[in-house]
Image (cartoon, coloured by chain):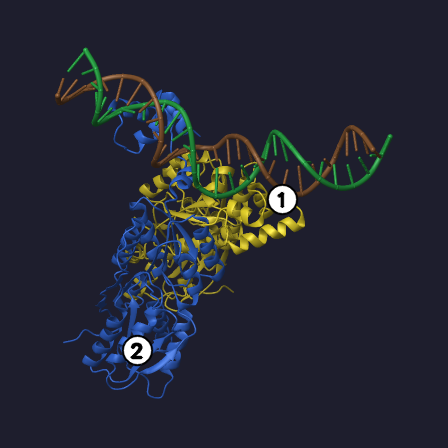
Chain colours: A blue, B yellow, C green, D brown
Amino acid sequence: MATSRDVAQRAGVSQSTVSRALSGHPGVTEEVRRRVQAAARDLLYVPNAAARTMRTSRSGNIGVVTARLHNPIYPEMLQLLGRELRLAGLRMIVWNSDETDEGAAADAARQGMVDGIIFTSATQASTALYEEIAQRLPVVLVNRTVEGWPCDQVASDNHAGGRAVADYFRQAGRRRIGLLSGPLWPSTIREREAGFLEGCLDGPPMTVRTEAFTYTAGAEGMGRLLALADRPDAVFCANDVLALGARDAARLAGVAVPGEVWLVGYDDIAMASWTAFDLTTIRQPIEEMVREAVRLLLQRLAGEEAPRQRLCLPGALVVRGTTERLG
Amino acid sequence: MATSRDVAQRAGVSQSTVSRALSGHPGVTEEVRRRVQAAARDLLYVPNAAARTMRTSRSGNIGVVTARLHNPIYPEMLQLLGRELRLAGLRMIVWNSDETDEGAAADAARQGMVDGIIFTSATQASTALYEEIAQRLPVVLVNRTVEGWPCDQVASDNHAGGRAVADYFRQAGRRRIGLLSGPLWPSTIREREAGFLEGCLDGPPMTVRTEAFTYTAGAEGMGRLLALADRPDAVFCANDVLALGARDAARLAGVAVPGEVWLVGYDDIAMASWTAFDLTTIRQPIEEMVREAVRLLLQRLAGEEAPRQRLCLPGALVVRGTTERLG
DNA sequence: ATCAATCAAGAATACGTATTCATGGCCGAA
DNA sequence: TTCGGCCATGAATACGTATTCTTGATTGAT
């Protein structure tokens, strides 16, 4: 493993000159720079990351804490984050938002192994973790937000999205409204519900709250809604995974969709467009969300002292076969 | 950020003693050790990762190169890898197997930012990358294998799996056999096909080869199989994602499954068990595969000079609603 | 022609840890 | 009591880089 000293020796210059020449520092003769670059190429020299980190106290690593939940939106965000960070010359270290893994993330922060952290699935529950980390490193939240954390946060407009679904139902003349949702700790869910309820002008919907955001829970919850005496003719599911379960529960029960009941999800994951489901849903602009989140993090890393930002990007209703087009 | 010197000062000992006391080195008085630990706790001291890495030339990071393909098996493996590595006290840096990202992985290897690398989606195509990395670091392949790479490799028995499907079809009296597969660069696909063909005793199956392993490609490919004059009565899909597309193509064409055509996939991803698909498939023991891969990597990191291993774990046929149970 | 100023490059240093080398004290044996 | 040896601890050092501090030379102006 060649060091900058080896390069220096081969190029007939000092180690400091090698460092300057390779990092594009001004005040290096063009001829010397060329000699150094040639020597570096010959020796396959690459600066040692640990030494550079120690000297600059910048590791080039960004930590990403993501949910292990069986929602394909998280892998998708992870991939986009990886791409965006790489374009900025940064690496991505990944942790799940289990308690144990979150501890590992905090350790990495304390050790200086990462320069910043992005949460895709933050909740109030990990406030201690947040405070631990935030006093050393910039933190950015994307997707889920947390009211009490004074950091940059990027989300889509979940409130407006929920509201749009309610409006859509009402304008279509749907009267018996159902809400199939899950636990309330994610901000996304709370906001979608709030927007939806706000738009339910004829009173609160029939609500079933599952214990998890899984296909199975969605199916089971939809079963309960369909078993009601006054069965709903339109159901809003708080995310697509629940909605897919709900769609299959209807299929299994022989209930026609959209004939007897409309179904709307949230996220527009890939499966929503599949023939078997063909799910009407609200699309989240996750690519844009991720890009903004990385941009904000880079700003913080550059030391900008701008006030904390809370970005809220618009989603869009995507009408498919589990509802009927208006007009 | 407290350093070991700060701890030393507070505990009234030298920096070396702090290092020894905290790393459980013998030859430190119990009383001194307690004093050091107390001081470290008071100052929230955590050893600096970069310094430790420079000194020990061990970063505690493992690189994972994974596919971005829209196959949920990869996120699943990623999560399992993360858990398994964390249990070993290691962090996980993730790259996609795009060309650009693979370059980033090679850089990290050269810079000493990772101690080892795990590929989940290796192909012959990245042989240059492999050789670049393998001469510095231990490399382990999981899921996909590559014949010419002299490193530890872990896969499931794709050949036997493919064979099992063919046997199943034959014993059920299926005669008009179809194969819906994709590109041949992944070893998994090649082996599944080879095993399957070996079991097609009545001659080669009607074969459709898609250009990608996506839902859409699967649907389109199944459309072509169903359009054949001598339409197959049993189709083996080289993975579940293709099979889900195929299932939906049949649904759309009004072809009964399993009434008119049987369908079998490979992987047993979560969606395979969903009501909408209820897909018969071969389950891969990915949890075990991941565990073995990490175990092998840890052995290499420990410096063991055992001969390269190639593990091949058995899969299992999971019969669901796209076929009928025998007997 | 002389001196100040500019500039390229070398020397020295610090980052924080783990480890080797050095040292002083204590214990046991003769 | 004295000396050898062991042991706990302190001192010193190396890891490889980026950067500050020095130095020697060259240029330009008077």
Which of A217 and B167 lies nearest the eye of the viewer? A217
- Give the image location of residue B303, x and y in percent: 56, 37
On the same chain, marks 1 and 2? The answer is no
Q: Please tell me which residue is depicted at 22% across the width and 69% down the height of the picture.
A: A319
Q: Tell which subunit mark 2 falls on.
A: A
Q: Please tell me which residue is depicted at 38% across the width and 73% down the height of the picture.
A: A184
Q: Which residue is mark 1?
A: B25
Which of B77 and B16 lies nearest the eye of the viewer? B16
Label 1 residue SS = loop
Going by the numbered disc 1, the residue's amino acid type is His
Q: Quadrant of residue A51?
A: top left
- Give the image location of residue B145, x and y in percent: 45, 42
Label 2 residue SS = strand
Count how many numbered circles sit on residues in the image: 2
Which-is-in-front pick, marks 1 and 2?
A: 1
Going by the numbered disc 2, the residue's amino acid type is Val
Q: Tell which subunit mark 1 falls on.
A: B
Which of B32 and A321 lies nearest the eye of the viewer? B32
The reply to whether residue B210 is in sight is no
Mark seen at residue B275: none
Q: Please tell me which residue is depicted at 45% across the width and 52% down the height of the picture.
A: A110
- Give the image location of residue B195, x and y in percent: 46, 47
Q: Which residue is mark 2?
A: A235
User: Is residue B122 placed above or below D28 in the rendered structure?
Assistant: below
- Give the image location of residue B172, x and y in percent: 46, 60
User: Is residue B225 placed above or below B15 in the rendered structure?
Assistant: below
Q: Quadrant of residue A102?
A: bottom left
Badge 2: few (under 14), some or many (20 or more) residues near its Cα, within 10 Å?
many
Q: CA distance from mark 1 to mark 2?
A: 63 Å
